[in-house]
Image: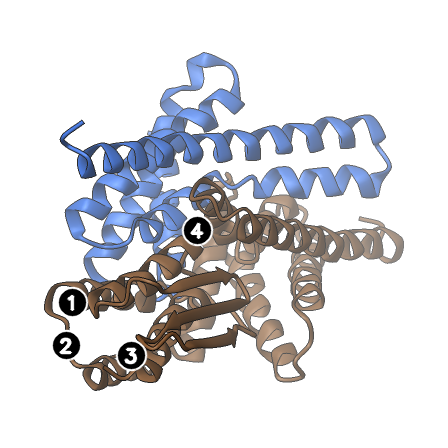
Chain colours: A brown, B blue
């Protein structure tokens, strides 16, 4: 039994889960299960949204520890699902570690939506939410552009590795500015519904849902981190839209 | 008829988010249906005249649906839960709170802000209740010999 390989594999599994929007308890439990599947009962695992720590003790009493930072987290539930399926497979069949690594690599390289398709998805979500909040079809058309603009803004700023607080603020500002400008030309548009619909793209729904699930599972630390994250994002969104609103009131007199 | 359209748009919005989060196939359909179901419950609870309670019931139903679908489709429950809860997220509340703040209408600012907090609380407690119940059932099953 190669303990170094085991630790590497477990950390890699946990990393995929945490960095793609899985819950903390899922990551910790998966790593524990991998250890137990290979007969290691003294594995210690600790994870928070941006760090994973794992220690196991070899039979001669030597501890092996690995720490892995999770610098960036995205939401890719397809990967969470795949890793989850892999863990079931590991627990029931105990494949060789090299096999697991190959599978993990395959999951890590699974295709994501291409950038144009992502832009389209953002636009569709914005339009659908605008209609959902009671906007007219004309509002939805403007929201399409707002949604696409949000994705483009995020894409543009991410190339400069701008922090996420500013990214959210800028994206929210751009969406609100487009909606307000459109409303300035066509009074029939209800700019509030357009903005709310478009901004749903940025609202941290995943952080809100996962933070409760983390806290229930007993991972208070992870829960608090996520709560802070969602409050920060909400503040950034409100600030961005607020700046756009104030600006248009001053310059256009809407 | 209005109920139908609202649920349809809820479904469409959830489906668009599924694409963003790379959920495909059957899971996309089931998760988006959860979103429509949640909003249907919200609208059916309108006679209660208290939207925080409406949000609470809608969340509870959505969470139960998500846990059920997770067992049924053998997929993590988060996948369904994150998507299905989206229509209930108080995006409008956050926006109007901010707008009142910008206008300078302090009393409405505080009122809307507290109301939005109340809605978030209802969502959180709804998810909490169902997840706790599910965990209890799990543990009870693991120790059948009690």
Judging depth in this view, the residue of A186 and A222 nearest the camera is A222
Which label's residue is closer to the chain start, 2 or 3? 2
Quadrant of the frame with the N terminus of chain B: top left
Kindly report which numbered mark, 4 or 3, lies closer to the viewer in this rendering: 3
Chain letter for mark 2? A
**Residue labelled with disc 3:** A104
**Residue labelled with disc 2:** A95
- Are both tags, 2 and 3, on one chain? yes
Disc number for residue A89: 1
**Residue labelled with disc 4:** A128
Judging depth in this view, the residue of A37 and B63 nearest the camera is A37
Mark 2 touches mark 1? (CB < 8 Å): yes
Which label's residue is closer to the chain start, 1 or 3? 1
Residue at 47 percent of width and 71 percent of height: A119
Residue A120, horizontal then vertical, whole percent: 43, 69
- Are both tags, 2 and 4, on one chain? yes
Label 4, residues with CA under 10 Å away: few <14, some 14-19, many ≥20: many
Kindly report which numbered mark, 2 or 3, lies closer to the viewer in this rendering: 2
Chain letter for mark 1? A
Marks 2 and 1, how far apart at CA: 8 Å
Label 1, residues with CA under 10 Å away: few <14, some 14-19, many ≥20: few
- Are both tags, 1 and 4, on one chain? yes
């Amino acid at each position: 039994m190669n303990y170094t390989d085991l630790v590497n594999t477990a950390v890699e599994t946990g990393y995929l889960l945490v960095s793609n929007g899985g819950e903390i308890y899922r990551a910790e439990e998966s790593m524990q299960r991998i250890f137990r599947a290979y007969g290691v009962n003294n594995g210690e695992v600790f994870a928070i949204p941006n760090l994973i720590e794992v220690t196991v003790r070899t039979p001669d009493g030597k501890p092996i520890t690995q720490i892995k930072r999770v610098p960036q987290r995205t939401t890719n539930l397809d990967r969470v699902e795949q890793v989850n399926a892999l863990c079931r497979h590991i627990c029931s069949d105990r494949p060789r570690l090299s096999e697991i690594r190959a599978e993990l690599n395959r999951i890590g390289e699974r295709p994501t939506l291409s950038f144009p398709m992502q832009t389209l998805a953002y636009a569709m979500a914005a339009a659908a939410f605008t209609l959902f909040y009671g906007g007219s079809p004309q509002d939805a058309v403007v929201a399409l552009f707002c949604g696409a603009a949000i994705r483009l803004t995020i894409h543009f700023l991410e190339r400069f590795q701008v922090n996420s607080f500013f990214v959210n603020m800028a994206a929210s500002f751009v969406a609100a500015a487009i909606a307000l400008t459109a409303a300035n030309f066509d009074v029939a548009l209800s700019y509030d519904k357009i903005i709310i619909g478009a901004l749903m793209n940025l609202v941290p729904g995943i952080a809100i849902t996962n933070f409760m699930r983390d806290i229930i599972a007993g991972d208070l630390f992870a829960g608090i981190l996520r709560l802070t994250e969602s409050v920060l994002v909400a503040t950034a969104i409100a600030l961005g839209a607020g700046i756009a609103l104030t600006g248009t009131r001053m310059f256009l007199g809407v | 008829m209005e109920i139908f359209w609202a649920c349809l748009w809820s479904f469409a919005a959830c489906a668009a988010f599924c694409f963003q989060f790379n959920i495909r196939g059957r899971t996309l359909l089931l998760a988006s249906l959860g979103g429509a179901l949640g909003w249907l419950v919200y609208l059916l609870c309108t006679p209660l005249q208290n939207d925080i309670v409406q949000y609470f019931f809608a969340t509870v139903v959505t969470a139960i649906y998500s846990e059920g679908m997770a067992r049924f489709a053998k997929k993590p429950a988060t996948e369904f839960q994150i998507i299905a809860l989206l229509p209930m997220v108080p995006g409008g509340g956050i926006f109007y709170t901010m707008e009142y703040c910008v206008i300078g209408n302090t009393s409405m600012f505080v009122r809307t802000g507290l109301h939005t907090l109340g809605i978030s609380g209802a969502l959180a407690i709804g998810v909490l209740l169902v997840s706790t119940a599910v965990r209890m059932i799990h543990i009870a099953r693991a120790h059948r010999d009690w």
